[in-house]
Image: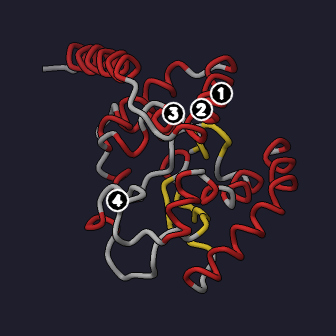
Amino acid sequence: MVLGGALLAVSLPVQALTALAILIDDGPPVLYRQPRAGRAGTSFRVVKFRSMRVHDQPAATIGQVGGDHPLVTRVGRVIRRCKLDELPQLWNVVGGTMSLIGPRPALPEQAAAYDAFQRRRLAVRPGMTGWGQVNGGTTLSWDERIVLDVWYVDHRSLHLDLRVVLLTLAVILRGERPQPSALARAEAYASEERAAVAVRRPA
């Protein structure tokens, strides 16, 4: 929270310029708020800069949103590519509903459909960036990102968090790229854990 507050103060000029660019390009509102599932499934409202046109389509019908999505605005493509749309979530970090690093917060209906293994993703606060984000992000399916995030939750450490920070900078510079080795390791771990649960489950 202390680090999030410091980053919030430093980023305020960038946030102001981003808000102005959104207003000029597509008008108000500048911010986008949406209910998400936090730690232990507790609901909270995530805050982002609006990168898509105002619409009334349910999130489930929109699918995975990339820079080429038809609802993404011109400024939206830029701020999504540079991850500037996530900066207002520093307010969530300061408020204690999010962390700087952790699984990206899921929609409540997505979290409600988790199986026992996937629910491990909710054992920590959601993050502004995380293991799933730096190993492919929106280039991966939702299930693949969950597997990566559960691997992170079960292996989290200061060293791993520092690695996520460095990889996040790489994503900002060169864009999201899938990392097959990280995904394969996480999927192998998921298979082992699910098999172990099946063995322990009484007949």
Q: Position of residue 75 (x, y in %)?
A: 56, 68
Rounded to the nearest angstrom, the CA distance separating label 2 from label 4 is 31 Å
Q: Secondary structure at mark 1?
A: helix
Residue type highlighted by circle 1 = Leu
The reply to whether dot 2 and dot 3 touch (C-beta < 8 Å) is yes
Q: Is residue 190 above or below residue 7?
A: above
Q: Quadrant of residue 55?
A: bottom left
* Dot in front, 1 or 2: 2
Rounded to the nearest angstrom, the CA distance separating label 1 from label 3 is 9 Å
Q: Which residue is mark 4?
A: 109
The residue lying at 60 percent from left, 60 percent from top is 85
The residue lying at 60 percent from left, 64 percent from top is 48
Bin the neighbour count of mark 1 within 10 Å (Cα to Cα): few under 14, some 14-19, many 20 and up: few
Q: Secondary structure at mark 3?
A: helix
The reply to whether dot 1 and dot 2 touch (C-beta < 8 Å) is yes
Q: Position of residue 104 (x, y in %)?
A: 51, 46
Q: Nearer the viewer, residue 170 or 111?
A: 170
Q: Which residue is mark 1?
A: 166
Q: Secondary structure at mark 4?
A: helix
Q: Is residue 182 left or right of residue 155?
A: left
Q: Nearer the viewer, residue 170 or 121?
A: 170
Ranked by sequence position, the earlier of labels 4 and 1 is 4
